Amino acid sequence: MFKFNLIILLFLLFSALAVANEEELLPPEQAFVLSTQLSESNQIDLRWDIAEGYYLYKQKLKLDLNGQVIDYSQLELPEGIPIEDPLFGLVNIYKNQLAFSIANRQTNPAVNLTVSYQGCYEPLGICYPPQTESFNLISQAQASDSPAKTGIFSQGNVFTINPDEEFLPVDEAFQLVITNTDTNRVVANFEAAEGYYLYKPHIKFNSENPQIILSEINYPEGIVKDDPHFGEIEVYYGNATIPINLARLAKTNDLSLVAEYQGCAEDGICYQPQTRKIEMTLADFDGPFADAGVNNQDVSNDKSLFWYLLAAFGGGLLLTFTPCVLPMIPILSGIIMAERGKGGLHHSGLLSVIYVLGTAVSYSLIGAVAGASGEQLQAYFQTPWAIGFLSVLLLLMSLSMFGFFKLQVPAFMQTSLSGHSQKLASGGAISVFAMGLISALIVGACVSPLLISTLSIAIAKGSALLGAALMFSMAMGMGVVLIFFGFEFGHLVPKAGTWMEDINKIIGFLLLAVAIYLLSFIPAIPVLFLWSLLLVSMAIFLFSKQFNKGFTIIAKTAAVLSLVWGVLAFIGGLNGYRDIMNPLPIKQLVAGSSTQTQLKTDLFTIVTSNSEIDELFAQARTENKFVMLDYYADWCLDCLRMEGSTFKDPGIANLLNEKFINVKVDVTDASDEAVKSVKKRFNVFGPPATLFFSADGNEFADLKFYGYRDSEEFMQILKRVTG
């Protein structure tokens, strides 16, 4: 029975192969038979008779009528069949027959017509290059006096294929071999048969094993070819060798490599994009840190490591007076005030050192995770629950500064620590360290170009150790000002009197400001109303206080500014704005509130997956528009600033609506696998990140940026994209 079934199976297999070998690819003029005529009513009729198994692209139809170019969108064409095409994305096609007419508005009785079209053979997935046919037409009334027949009077530039020629199967036309040359490198070797070529930009590789990443792919230079499908593009003839460097993040030798590529034959047929998965076992990694996947000892002994760490430290210094660090100063001030009197003169300085060490541990953890996996750890902590928790802590600290109650170590702990009055109390040290740890995760690890640059080094080398070292160095650079502030603040804090109460209240206001700053990460909270309440309260406090002559003018001026700012914040909150640094944008007021509402709701399409992005790229190709990808998260403050100011600028919004497909990639949930995938696809570390693409999907890599851009800066970038 088994032998009988085997015979039947072999018979069917050879029968299928025989049928496949008998298939002949028709020349395009036989696959798509085009006829035209100019009727007595001066109307041009066109008809394609399409062979079985073939189809025409709607979007590739174009006419040249006595020098006037007519695009498919200007023709009254049948709807066609929508398909997701491997070459052109979402398109419409015609099968069997296509017929339509256009009015001839030329006064000349003779018509010179050039028709451009393109089609494919569906069973083999083979597409022809664009075809061009030229016709000289005369009306039927004139043709009746002439022996010539109407319709096709002459044919011009028509590409023909020899029907006797056989084209190679795709796996024979383009052979791919992957070899493992050493512990952390493989080499992809493509061999294109004679008369065939591969598109360099269409060759891509990816690892499906998350413990092995492709850290560097070295593509050789190709030959620039004027291709009928893609215009000028680099291609590979013959052999193309592509070294691929690997970074192993765990002790594993199993690599699942996915290769994507596409090529054509010189005689005109093009194959559909190919995807191959190659499973292979890598050579054992014999370094001392095999479990980490990367030889971290080599990384730590690298001569450039010193300069990496120095650059990270300098980057931290540059971030000192940014939203990454400034919110920490009021927090540290509140800690010092709460712990005053428990140690000597330098007690506040020691507190600041411990606080900075707590932030450095957080940053090191962020760097280690990014180096190992490319993930932004901070995103997991900037959730409404985490932000709310720290905001409540800050609120309690501020209420303590206002004298509503006193935060202190419990009495039984104070008794046990009384013998160490001249030293830093261990209970205080633990709480200060924990506060630094938490606040750095939520407040300080903002995504900026400097932070991205620092982490990209660790990500490229796949080293958790290097990531931790770089981020620790950056944290210490950011912490210098905090430590200096801590030591100096200890000298400035008065020991007793009314000044002490006033300083307590000022620090209380600053702590509330940090809490509101954190709450601005949560879109549902109308933060400008909170800012307005805080600023007006500060104004009332400053107006009510009696200062000596040296401070009276300063205090009253600050009170007036605070009051005006608070009123503007309240009005801005009524209009739906969120940015306290720009609570009432003048341009938006001039444009009107109706425009604001329209722009907010109509400008972007929100997506969370690669499939949704692919659909919008296909739409951009169809509509010949640029694409802007804006990586956004609800917890990203700069994202909210961009949304509340830059994207509401009428000039920017109009340009984006006119020439761009605008995609907002929501990466709020960092644990979602789809979110991880959309970040990895374009090598985006975290929001806010803005990327630009041409209609055919090519990225303007030099215009990619992270962080906030105001209206003027952003408009300059858009002008560079659109030319």
Image (cartoon, rainbow, N blue to C red):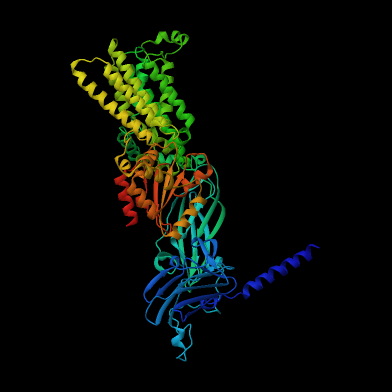
- In this view, the residue in front, 447 or 284, is 447
- In this view, the residue in front, 178 or 340, is 340
Residue 304, image x and y in percent? Answer: 35, 42
Left or right of 305 on screen, residue 99: right
Residue 57, image x and y in percent? Answer: 50, 67
Question: Residue 231's quadrant in the figure?
Answer: bottom left
Residue 414, image x and y in percent? Answer: 44, 10
Question: Residue 25's quadrant in the figure?
Answer: bottom right
Examine the rendered structure and indicate whether residue 473 appears above or below residue 547: below
Residue drawn at x 36%, y 44% as measured from the top left: 648
Quarter of the picture containing the C terminus is bottom left
Residue drawn at x 56%, y 65% as measured from the top left: 171
Examine the rendered structure and indicate whether residue 496 appears above or below residue 195: above
Q: Residue furthest left?
A: 549
Residue 332, image x and y in percent? Answer: 35, 23
Examine the rendered structure and indicate whether residue 57 appears above or below residue 507: below
Q: How many marks?
A: 0
Question: Residue 397's quadrant in the figure?
Answer: top left
- In this view, the residue in front, 294 or 345, is 345
Quarter of the picture containing the N terminus is bottom right
